[in-house]
Image: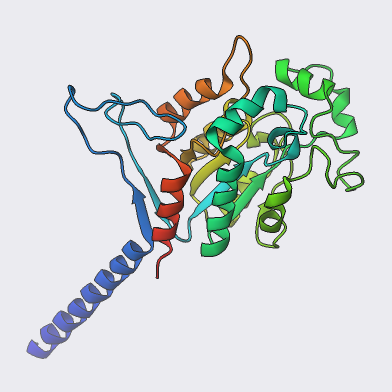
């Protein structure tokens, strides 16, 4: 009987040590984008901006735990019609893109993913000829169709794709065409409801998303909402997106409020890149 209890105790000790080692391994492969420290009400208080996370802004800050293996970067519409000065929307999005450094910041996310092995998913926006036969559209759907935004002849050809408004920004091509990045089927309005992004993420074992891309209050925000509704944990990289600014409306400002109120965390590219590197340290 004593031998039995001795063996059981030894087994329990080994099991405990194994569990502790497993926990330590997980902890070394994770990095928590912690909420900012709490401040007294009469001290620092700051809303989220493109470049700075919020401090003591009166809202909870759940934080976002980046873990190697189940966290991925999702980029919406990294395409010429949004991000190139030659794109059809540059007249309304160019100011926001330039102020935020969006092109460079999306590039930094692609780069750190390539260096660490973090999975990347791109959700593009394409319109084929049959899409122009829709019988009803929303406001900006009408505009996009009228200006030929993201147009391609049809789904089974890349004819005239290279260098078009629907094509990737040139500096992103080495990262997107590397054979590792998942390019989903196109979304047709704003969110991933009409493409296979959720399926691809689930099949890859991803349950946490670092979200970036264009355009902030349209496709990016719609992806955030849909992913959260589908059970994903989402953070938004606030200076790796941008929005249209017109005489009467500021799309980026509208989205920034919703990012802060809905996502688990919002932060800038520099902090996010550092967090990804920390999560993948060996």
Q: Residue furthest bottom?
A: 3
Identify the residue at image location x=36%, y=55%. Answer: 31
The quarter of the picture where the N terminus appears is bottom left
Q: Position of residue 9 (x, y in %)?
A: 14, 80
- The answer to whether 169 appears left or right of 9 in the picture is right
Q: Is residue 4 above or below residue 252?
A: below
Does residue 262 appear anywhere in the picture? Answer: yes
Q: Position of residue 127 (x, y in %)?
A: 81, 33
Identify the residue at image location x=82%, y=24%. Answer: 145
Identify the residue at image location x=48%, y=26%. Answer: 256
The quarter of the picture where the C terminus appears is bottom left
Residue 88 sits in quarter: top right
Query: Viewer-proximal residue, 2 or 260?
Result: 260
- The answer to whether 77 appears left or right of 156 in the picture is left
Does residue 222 appear anywhere in the picture? Answer: no
Q: Position of residue 79 (x, y in %)?
A: 72, 40
């Amino acid at each position: 009987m004593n031998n039995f209890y001795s063996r059981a105790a030894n087994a329990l000790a080994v099991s405990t040590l194994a569990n502790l080692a497993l926990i330590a391994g997980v902890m070394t492969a994770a990095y928590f984008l912690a909420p900012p420290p709490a401040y007294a009400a009469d001290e620092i208080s700051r809303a989220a901006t493109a470049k700075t996370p919020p401090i003591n802004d009166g809202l909870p800050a759940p934080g976002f735990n980046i873990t190697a293996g189940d966290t991925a970067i999702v980029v919406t519409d990294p395409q010429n019609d949004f991000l190139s000065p030659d794109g059809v929307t540059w007249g309304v999005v160019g100011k926001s893109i330039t102020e935020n450094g969006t092109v460079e910041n999306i590039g930094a996310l692609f780069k750190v993913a390539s260096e660490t092995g973090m999975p990347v998913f791109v959700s593009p926006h394409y319109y084929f000829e049959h899409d122009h036969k829709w019988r009803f559209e929303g406001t900006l759907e009408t505009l996009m169709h009228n200006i030929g935004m993201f147009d391609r002849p049809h789904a089974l050809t890349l004819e005239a794709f290279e260098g078009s408004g629907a094509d990737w920004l040139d500096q992103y091509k080495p990262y997107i065409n590397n054979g590792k990045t998942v390019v989903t089927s196109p979304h047709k309005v704003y969110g991933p409801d009409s493409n296979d992004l959720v399926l691809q993420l689930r099949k890859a074992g991803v349950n946490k998303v670092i979200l970036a891309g264009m355009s902030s209050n349209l496709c990016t925000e719609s992806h955030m909402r849909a992913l959260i509704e589908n059970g994903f944990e989402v953070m938004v990289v606030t200076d790796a997106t941008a929005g249209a600014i017109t005489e009467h409306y500021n799309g980026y400002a509208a989205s920034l409020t919703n990012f802060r109120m809905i996502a688990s965390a919002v932060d800038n590219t520099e902090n996010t890149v550092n967090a990804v590197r920390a999560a993948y340290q060996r």
